[in-house]
Each structure stands twice: as C-alpha cells, then as structure tokens.
Image (cartoon, rainbow, N blue to C red):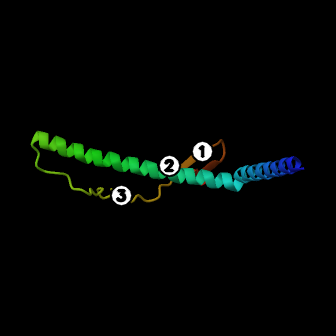
Amino acid sequence: MFRRTFWFTAGAAAGVWATTKVNRKIQQLTPESLAAQAANKAVEAGHRLKDFALDVRAGMVQREAELGEALGLDASPPADRELPEPRRRAALGPTQHKTTTTFSSRTISYNRNEDH
C-alpha cells in the first residue's frame, strides 16, 4: 500500500513539475515576451557600446597626452572640445526651371518643379 502511494505522489509531482515547466516556456515564447526580450538585449548592447566608446575616448586622450609629452608640446587639448559652429548656407531664392517645347503649330510651357 505504501509503495502505491509513493509512486502515485511521485507521478503527480512529476506531472505538476512538467506542466509548470511547459507553461513557463510557452509564456517566454509569446510575441510580447519575445519583443520585451529583444528590447532588453538592444538596450544592453547600447550600454556596452557606450562604455566601449568612453573607453576608447579615454585611451585616445591618454595617448594624445603621451605623444604631446614625447614631442615636447605643452599645449594640452581641452577636456571638453566643442564642435565648430555650423556653416550657414547662402539663402537662395526659388529657382524656376521653365522648359518650352515647340511643336508645329503650338508652344507648350511647363515648370519642371511641378512634376515632382
């Protein structure tokens, strides 16, 4: 009698364990869960890329300082360089591209800008 109860309980526990495992796997494979996992991986990759860029920048500044010292240059670059002002383009008025086509008895004129 005890033997049957043991195996019945072991079978029930294995069934509950297997059902729980399958349900968790099904939840992981839903579209919403897959999208969330992909977004988390993308954010994580972005953080790693940012850390890499910061390490490269620090190494570059250190190497520039070493080269400046080796070459005897006293002017050290500023820590936070600013970008130059953007160039301003000259304001050009609208250009009219007129084309005139002449056929035997009539002239057709159109603006090429209206074709787009």
Residue type for callout 3: Ala
Mark 3 residue crowding within 10 angstroms, few (<14) / some (14–19) / many (20+): few
Question: Which x, y percent locates residue 6?
Answer: 83, 49
Q: Quick one: which residue is furthest to the right in this view?
A: 1
Secondary structure under badge 2?
helix
Question: Which x, y percent locates residue 109?
Answer: 60, 51
Name the residue at 72% across, 53% down.
24
Q: Is residue 116 visible?
A: no
- Left or right relative to 77: residue 99: right
Badge 1 or badge 2: first in the primary sequence: 2
Q: What's the distance in space between the residues labelled 1 and 3, CA to CA? A: 33 Å
Instruction: Say whether marks 1 and 3 touch (CB < 8 Å).
Output: no
Nearer to us of marks 1 and 3 is 3
Secondary structure under badge 1?
strand
Residue type for callout 1: Thr
Q: Nearer the viewer, residue 75 or 21?
A: 21
Name the residue at 62% across, 52% down.
37
Q: Nearer the viewer, residue 60 or 82?
A: 60
Q: What's the distance in space between the residues labelled 1 and 2, CA to CA? A: 59 Å
Q: On residue 90, which mark appears?
A: 3
Label 1 belongs to which residue?
A: 101
Label 2 belongs to which residue?
A: 45
Image: 25 above or below 82:
above
Q: Quick one: which residue is furthest to the front in this view?
A: 1
Q: Nearer the viewer, residue 83 or 47?
A: 47
